[in-house]
Image: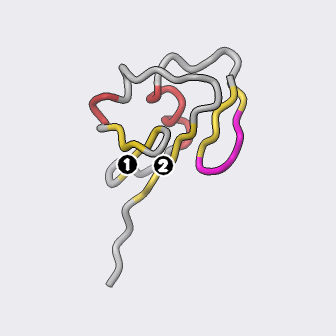
Amino acid sequence: MKLIINQQQKVFDPAPPSLAAAVTPELTQRSKGIAVALNNRVVPREKWLETTLQDGDTILIISATQGG
């Protein structure tokens, strides 16, 4: 399965069973302040495990930062 994660193509074999399985390896030490969008729609964290993926899906992982 081919996915685009943060504008980089990734190939999974076998295909990840859920959105959570695809994004967890991509997360840094921080797990708070993270949002994930699947095909331009934000997916609430509680839905990551039940959200299935299709070949060619685009995933964007967004990390909140402080600023002023």
Tell me the SS state at disc 2: strand
Q: Where is residue 7 in the image (x, y as percent from the top left)?
A: 64, 50
Q: In which quarter of the image is residue 22?
A: top right
46 left or right, relative to 2? left
Identified by mark 2, the residue type is Ile
Could you tell me how far apart the alpha carbons at marks 1 and 2 are, in whole angstroms? 6 Å
The N terminus appears in which quarter of the rendering?
Answer: top right
Q: Position of residue 66 (x, y in %)?
A: 34, 73
Q: Residues within 10 Å of mark 2 (few under 14, many from 20)?
A: some
Give the mark count. Answer: 2
Q: Which residue is located at x 32 percent, y 84 percent?
A: 68
Image disc number at residue 61:
2
Residue that label 1 marks? 35
Find the magenta span and give its range: 6-10
Callout 1 touching callout 2 (CB < 8 Å): yes
Q: Which residue is located at x 36 percent, y 43 percent?
A: 42
Q: Where is residue 50 in the image (x, y as percent from the top left)?
A: 36, 20
